[in-house]
Image (cartoon, helix red, strand yellow):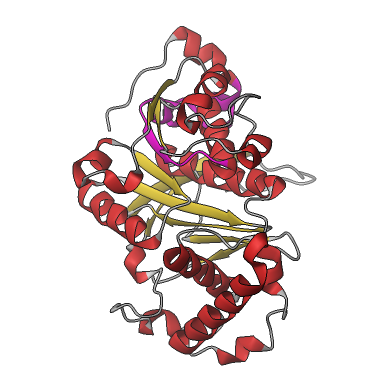
Amino acid sequence: MAEKQLSAVEAELYDRQIRLWGIESQEKLRAANVLLINIRALGSEIAKNILLSGINSLTILDDGTVTEEEQQKNFLLNKGSVGNPIADEVLIKAQALNPLVKIKVDKQPPSSKDSSYFKNFTIIVATCIKTDLLLKIDKVCRSSNVKLIYGDVFGTFGFSVADFLDHNYHEDQIKLAGKKRTHGEKDHEKTTIKVQGVINYPELKKVLILPNTKQSADSIKKSKRRNELFYIMLALMEFRNKNNRNPAIESKEGDLKTLETIKADIFQLYEVDELKTKLPADIFELVFGEEVVPVCSVVGGVIAQEVIKAVSEKEVPVNNIFLFDPITFDGKEEAIGA
């Protein structure tokens, strides 16, 4: 990725950010070309934050049309948008957030794209897609040195999972100068040092292992102290795979039964039957209602933050799963499949 030197206009616009993470990181962001797959309630929050960060370009890939419910949840939409392509309808407000970023829209289905399409980006952010497509994209990304993060919100539960390849990063740490103290001296001279590190992310097919697949879950089963929300995440992904939609209030009774069956299959696969007593009996009651806007704001902020870390290589990113607890509203980090 060739970094682009900031213009005087950009340096002035991004002055506060440059003070926060430095000119080198801002130049890396300035060179980044981002693909966002689906710009619904969660996607709009992600788009807002990465546009404001000062990337080079954002491509929005979404073949959907605006529904009345979506119009109420998505702050990038205007009144009168219902029935129109969502990618077109978000464009005006999205561009207004940062006129310096080039924004493109693509209204073709994400599943229709061939492998070459996904190779042209610095990082891909995916939402609202099925697992088979996600794993296909991840395979292309790994062969093309493109980073990937996927996230979703189901009711008040949200999550993200990242594959940032072999990710090099640095962080600034404060260090006390090693000098001999004199009598009565209290203060030590402080210096800032750059500490470098690397995180080796596993490919997603080793992280998102679902029932009835050929992939072995043995590496994940070795850790018995896994956050139980990880398995709820898998159950929701499998529900979408089977039904091509999220759990819906209008079919709640049947969907709850389906989710419980899927959960039982996942518990059996991972040999974690003891979680039956740890998880609240009504945990799936919290995943209905499509995307809850405040949760989208939190999870979207986290995902956008991870995009900024991945591109700028500044600060330690999540390795590799973030889980938003629908009961306590806390964020949990899990390292899966490493």
Between 55 and 233, the one nearer to me in the picture: 233
Q: Is any part of residue 208 visible from this angle?
A: yes
Q: Is residue 4 above or below residue 162?
A: above
Between 215 and 129, the one nearer to me in the picture: 129
Q: List x then y, in percent, for residue 154.
A: 61, 58
Q: Which residues are magenta?
A: 16-40
Q: Is residue 106 left or right of residue 76?
A: left
Q: List x then y, in percent, for residue 84.
A: 50, 29
Residue placed at 65% from the left, 31% from the top?
A: 75
Residue 79 falls in image quadrant: top right
Question: Which quarter of the rendering shows the N terminus?
Answer: top left
Between 217 and 282, the one nearer to me in the picture: 282
Residue 280 falls in image quadrant: bottom right
Q: Is residue 258 left or right of residue 62?
A: right
Residue placed at 50% from the left, 51% from the top?
A: 316
Residue placed at 66% from the left, 39% from the top?
A: 73
Q: List x then y, in percent, for residue 119.
A: 24, 41
